[in-house]
Amino acid sequence: AQRVTQPEKLLSVFKGAPVELKCNYSYSGSPELFWYVQYSRQRLQLLLRHISRESIKGFTADLNKGETSFHLKKPFAQEEDSAMYYCALSPFSGGYNKLIFGAGTRLAVHP
Amino acid sequence: GAVVSQHPSWVICKSGTSVKIECRSLDFQATTMFWYRQFPKKSLMLMATSNEGSKATYEQGVEKDKFLINHASLTLSTLTVTSAHPEDSSFYICSARRGFSGNTIYFGEGSWLTVV
């Protein structure tokens, strides 16, 4: 079964602290993994995808196939990072790029 | 950047009536659109994949006769909730894939449906 698990509903940190939002997935094939972000009162938008291997707004995520994880990290959190973060999986076999979302983690960065 | 727009942003309807939500790709052609449902403080649940010119592919457990999806053009997909009930009240979000391949997906702003 295809499943994305984000174990933390809320992650609360102070500005400047490191952040790690956890994501584990379950899929028999080789999926593509994404992180989406939803700021307050805004639509869902792509933050990064594992095949790009890029850093966006200081965030990085490495796909660990052995641990089936795709944790999102940032060394120094900023207040503007406060948002809802969703980890998502797209099965290659789908062909239509449907996304399976995790439950989401709310990141709250305090001054 | 690419824009996906949903209309209406919110709607209230009476039980038993039908309500239509539109999803438009404003500046690109979308051969495939997706419809999601999100309950408060819950994740997005994929309801169906909408392909231009063909029948939608529904996820397991989603009633296709209740949630009618039409993708008549490359820029428009519609979701019609038929014979609405209060339990259909939710936040409905569409997304559109730009182009014929790849994973560039753009999301609409969502539509709040309240059935009274």
Image (tube, helix red, strand yellow):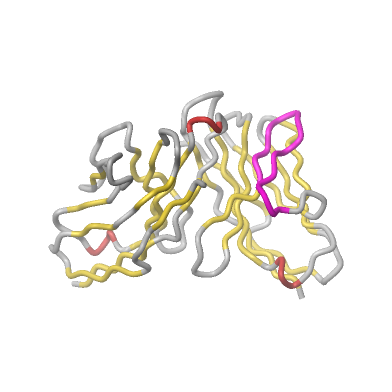
Tell me what residue is drawn at x 28 percent, y 59 percent. A81
The picture quadrant where one finds residue B111 is bottom right
Give how far across and how far down residue B33 sits, in percent: 62, 38
Tell me what residue is drawn at x 71 percent, y 66 percent. B88
Q: Horizontal placement of B17 versus A57: left or right?
A: right
Q: Most extreme residue toward the bottom, as rendered? A: B116
The picture quadrant where one finds residue B85 is bottom right
Query: Is B21 colored magenta in this rendering?
Result: no
The picture quadrant where one finds residue B56 is top right
B83 vs A42, nearest the viewer = B83
Tell me what residue is drawn at x 52 percent, y 47 percent. A1
Identify the image quadrant of the C terminus of chain B. Answer: bottom right
Give how far across and how far down residue B65 sits, in percent: 82, 51
Give how far across and how far down residue A98 sits, in percent: 54, 40
Extent of the magenta region: B48-62
Q: Horizontal placement of B6 versus B66: left or right?
A: left
Give how far across and how far down residue B44 sits, in percent: 53, 56
Q: Most extreme residue toward the top, as rendered? A: B100
Relative to B15, residue A60 above or below = above
